[in-house]
Every structure is written in C-alpha cells, then in structure tokens.
Amino acid sequence: MSTILECRGITKRFGGIVALQNVDFEVRSGQIVGLVGPNGSGKTTLLSCIAGSLQLTAGEIHFAGNNITKQKPHRRAHAGIARTFQVPRPLPSFNVVENVAVSAMFGRDAMPKASAVLRAREVLDQVGLGSHADSSVASLTLHERKFLEIARALALDPKLILLDEVLGGLNPSEAAEGMALIASLREAGVSVVYIEHNVKAVSSLADYMYVLNQGGNLAQGAPAEVLSDQRVIDAYLGGAAHA
Ligand SMILES: Nc1ncnc2c1ncn2[C@@H]1O[C@H](COP(=O)(O)OP(=O)(O)OP(=O)(O)O)[C@@H](O)[C@H]1O
Ligand SMILES: [Mg+2]
C-alpha cells in the first residue's frame, strides 16, 4: 500500500508555545488514520499544518509524492487535500447548496458555477442533507452544520480528507450516521485523517492510530495495540481504559 501523506519532524511554535515538537505522521492510501490525544496535544495544529493554513517552524510534508511544505493552502486543495474545521465555518450569507458549490468551484477540478451547483447537490445527497439544499445555514442544527462541513470538504473531490472532531456534540444516532459516512469515504477510495475525542469511535473505524501528547508522538499502531499501550493508558485514557 502506497503512502499518500508523509509528515517528518514537524515542529510548530506559536511564540514561546511549542504546539508540535518533531512529530512524524503518515497516511497510507485508502486508510482511515485516527488521531487522538488530550486537549491541547496539537491535533488541530497538525491538521492545519497539513492543510497549509499554518506554516511549519521545522519539518517537511510530502503529499502524493510531492514536497508541499511551502505550498499555499489553495494549491494543496487543488492537489487533493480537504479539511473540516472543529467549529463549523459556513459562509453565513450563502445558503446550504451555495456553501458547497463554492468549494466545488475551487477544488481539484475547478468548475463553473452551474456545474458546481450540480456537484454540490450530489454531495449534499451523499451526506444526507439533500432536503436542506435550499435552506439558510442559520436554520441548520449542530448535527447538520457538522455534516455541511463534511460536504464542503467533499465537494473539493479530495484524495485526502482531514476531519476535525466532526462527531463532537452529536447524539449517539447522529454519531453512528457520521461514522457510517466516514466508512463510506474509505469505500470510495478517499484517505481519511480522523481526529476525535471519542476514542471508541476512532478505534472502531481506524485502520491505524496515532496518539499525540503535549505536542509529541506518544504512540502509534493498530487500534487494539494503541488502546492497550500502557503509555497511552497512563497519559491519556487513565482509568477510563480499564472500565
Ligand atoms: N494560533 C495559535 N496561537 C497560539 N497558540 C496556539 C494556536 N493554536 C494552537 N495553539 C496552542 O497549541 C497547542 C495545541 O493546540 P491544538 O488546538 O492543536 O490542540 P488539540 O489537540 O487540537 O486540542 P483540542 O482537543 O482541545 O481540540 C495548545 O497549547 C494551544 O493553546
Ligand atoms: Mg483541536
């Protein structure tokens, strides 16, 4: 299986704060890679470094065989990297389908508005928001806004999608729906990086997992291996892992 994303020695400082220190991270093509760790361990920062909205302090990122370390975010989107935001960021003056169409216009296959709207409707059907296409984003529930966030990323037709806590705050049936959607992305051949606080949800979906702690790599491996790793239990899962 080929490697689609390779991050080597990623360091990111914000002034005096070291958010990431010499982190290695890899995604094999077609896999779901779970990324977990306590609050503030650097998960979102790593995602932003991969998507290009943050520049690295040190390290290198390779995507689909190219060194993208210095590339701007829109170039990375064109190359096939899409992300969601932990707090959904829809464009408030656009309705649901327009929010998705804007992504389609700037994705891997840049397209004119009419085609982008058609593509957006397809993607909204795919995530179960088809009936909300013409609604205002303000009318959406949290669950629907989270799925709109996924739709906006999917409209870019990504090879790699970076999901930042897309199930956070959802009830169990909504979360199950989200997990089925994430599994379907893998079926469609999209590689997935999946950040989630719900370690059980991550471990049930992921082919491979990384654990960050205080900005550094703590553990990695198959989910069962990682969940039973004493360092992970001590640093992160605590008593919950034994329960
Ligand atoms: N723009 C920023 N400026 C300054 N510090 C930042 C910035 N973004 C993140 N940090 C700091 O970097 C560290 C890592 O934050 P990050 O948001 O990546 O963690 P996280 O693992 O995503 O946490 P959470 O689980 O709460 O979402 C934290 O100490 C955070 O305060
Ligand atoms: Mg985060």
Image (cartoon, rainbow, N blue to C red):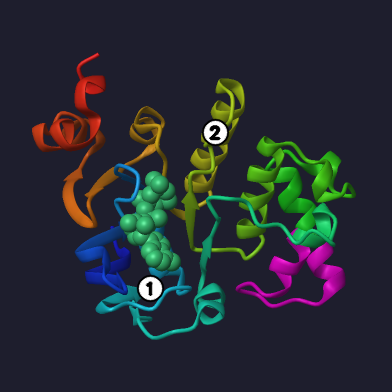
Whole-percent x and y of residue 54? 42, 74
Image quarter (top left, top right, bottom left or bottom right) of the C terminus: top left
Identified by mark 2, the residue type is Ala
Picture quadrant of residue 60: bottom left
Residues in magenta? 100-117
Q: In this view, does 190 lie above or below 135?
A: below
Which residue is tagged 2? Answer: 180
Q: Position of residue 149 (x, y in %)?
A: 64, 52
Element on which disc 2 rests: helix
Q: How far apart are marks 1 and 2 (CA)?
A: 26 Å
Q: In this view, does 220 lie to the left or right of 84?
A: left
Task: Name the residue nearer the viewer: 96 or 130.
Answer: 96
Residue at 27% x, 44% y is: 209
Q: Which residue is at the front of the view, 17 or 142?
A: 17
Name the residue type under label 1. Ala
Specify few, some or many for label 1: CA neighbours under 10 Å numbering under 14, 14-19, or 20 or more.
Answer: some
Say which residue appears at 80% left-offset and 49% top-offset: 137
Which residue sits furthest top? Answer: 243
- In reply to whether residue 106 is colored magenta, the answer given is yes
The answer to which of 171 and 116 lies nearer the viewer is 171
Helix, strand or loop for disc 1: loop
Residue occupying the point 55% across, 56% down: 84
